[in-house]
Every structure is written in C-alpha cells, then in structure tokens.
Image (tube, grey):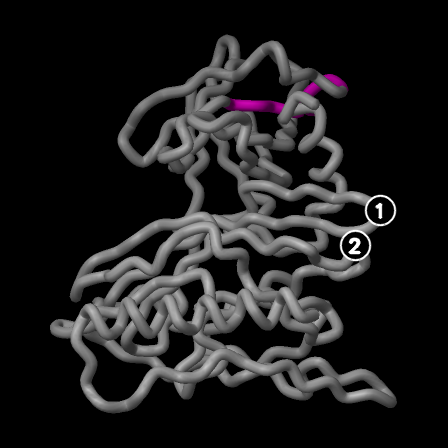
Amino acid sequence: MNAIRSIWPLVLIMGLIAASHAYPIQGSNGAVTCVVFDGYKSRYDMNTSALFLDVGMTRGINVTFEVVDQNNNTYPVDINHSRALQPGRFSLVFMLPMSSDAAYLTVIPEGSNPFSIAWDKPLKYTNGIANLRYYGITDWLLSNTSQTISVDISLSNNATEGEIVMSPENFTLVDQWGWRYFADATFSPVIIPPKSILRKEITFASISPRSRPALLEYDFATDHPIQIPLDTSLIEIQMSMPSESPAETHTEAAAPTARVNETTNVTQTLPQPPQLEQKPMTTQEKVLAARERLASVQEMMRKK
C-alpha cells in the first residue's frame, strides 16, 4: 500500500501523542492570518519523508505555500497529495529528504505580502551527561493484533571527556498503564564522543494495539534516566524540563515513573538488562557491554 494512503488516516489519531512541536502555531502579515493546526512527518520511501500540515487561512483567498528546511532549501506543496478542504482550510503535503527538518512555512497570499511561520526546535531533555531530543514519529503500523512505532531522536554527549554508547537497549516506550516495551535491535551499538551528537530512528515492535504511547525513556534502569512525555494526559509524570542552556550546564535527571507495570490486583516485574559497571571502562569494553545487554534483552523478549 502506498505510504501516503496508509499513513494519512493515522493523522486522525495523532492526538494520542503530543507532537514534538507545540500546535497550533500561526503567523500574519497584518492583513491575512494563517494557522497551522497540526503537523505530522512520516516516511514516504527510503529517501523521502512526507510532511502533513493541517492549515487554515482567515480569508478564503488564493495562496501558495512553501516549506523551508534547516539548510534553507525550499520545498513546494505536493499537489498530488494535497487538497483544499473548504475555503481557507487545507490539507497540505510536502516531500522532504529524510535528513531534512522543516524550519518554517512560507505563506504567499495572492495580492498580499508573504510571511513565515517558524517551528520551535524540539525540547532538550538531559541527565547532565546525555542530551535527548524527540523529533516525532516517523512510522506507525497498526493492525488488529499489534502495532509498530518508530520515533526520530537525537542523542548527544554532554561531557568534555569520555564516550557514551548508544544502543537500542537504551530505549523503552511506556504505555498508559506503565508497561515498558523494549526497542528492536535495528542497529548495532554506536560510540558518541564528547560534545558530539547522533540522530537515529528507534523502532518498537509487537506493541499491543490497545497500548497508547505515553513516555519515551533512555537508560531507565540506571541512576540517571531521561524521560520524555509523549502524552501527559495518560500517565502522571514528575518531569524536570530543562531550558536551552549551554552544553556545560547540568540539570537534574527526570524522576522515574512510579508503579511501573502495576495494575489494581497484579504486579509484574520484568527482568531488566544489567547496569554498566561503575569502574572506568575502555571504549571497546563499553561497546562489548552494550552488545551483551542488547543480547540479554533480545533473549528476554523471545521468552515473553
């Protein structure tokens, strides 16, 4: 099935997950106002992503839209997949390279001055050592028996010395009942040097179709987890929300979610991957340890 046809209906249930950007956003030239009610980015093919925007104009006039990415490249509306819903209301689709992020929407009204609407950069969450940003969902496959969710994140090493290792087993997805799902082993452990950043797609498969993503976690089984709320209405989270401070500024780690995997009558305890040893480790030892933990998680998931 074509990616556009299969993904577009999912926009209707994207209210289950707080977007990486705050919506609605709007801009104006004084005569015309444009509101972006919602937005969603999805994989179209191996090299292209589709950006869906729900847009409204205060006046039903002819208008042209363009998206500009972080490198100042401009992308026109894909007229084959976009449509005018009513006078002034549009469902817009833009085709961008997978590596591109939309920076702002340019609105060009007929007979009036153009103007732009900018997206804020996704919030940075940190434990003082690692910085984590969540850019949104890149793929969501839903069936009657399971769902698979892929998320776009970046992880940076905040330290001035010492590496950190990024591995699928670092990431968990928590649903509205506090159940943890472990990420699939879609890539091998990668070393992130000091003051460096790595962007990856993290995939969670075999999720119950009734689960609603509430929380994305990094290193939850350690003393310094990072937690990003995907829908704060689903699960109570005590969260530290650091501002965009310099890399050297440390903030406290987010408090771990309480009563995880607990229902009214039954408490389930999942075996968790072992923590890293506290003694200094070489880079090779860190990679080996990450691979061993990943194998442990995979073995655990096979037994579930």
Location of residue 260 in the rendering, given as x and y in whole percent from the top left corner: 67, 82
Rendering quarter of residue 189:
bottom left
Say the numbered circle drawn on residue 144: 1
Position of 35 relative to 135 (above/below): above
Residue type highlighted by circle 2: Pro
Helix, strand or loop status at disc 2 = loop
Q: Quadrant of the C terminus?
A: bottom right
Other residues around mark 1 within 10 Å, as few (<14) / some (14–19) / many (≥20): few
Discs 2, 1 touching: Cβ within 8 Å = yes
Rendering quarter of residue 290:
bottom left
Confirm whether residue 272 shows in the render: yes
Secondary structure, magenta segment, majority class: strand
Q: Reply yes or no: does residue 10 show up in magenta.
A: no
Location of residue 263 in the rendering, given as x and y in whole percent from the top left corner: 81, 83
Left or right placement of residue 138 versus residue 176 in this view: left
Q: Front-most of 276 and 101? A: 276
Q: CA distance from mark 2 to mark 1?
A: 7 Å
Left or right placement of residue 182 versus residue 177 in this view: left
Residue type highlighted by circle 1: Asn
Q: Residue at x 41, y 32 (%)?
A: 98
Say the numbered circle drawn on residue 209: 2
The residue segment tinted magenta is 86-94
Q: Reply yes or no: does residue 89 show up in magenta.
A: yes
Helix, strand or loop status at disc 1 = loop
Q: Earlier in the sequence, mark 2 or mark 1?
A: 1
Q: Residue at x 57, y 65 (%)?
A: 182
Position of 245 relative to 138 (above/below): below
Q: Front-most of 299 and 211? A: 299
Q: Residue at x 52, y 50 (%)?
A: 151
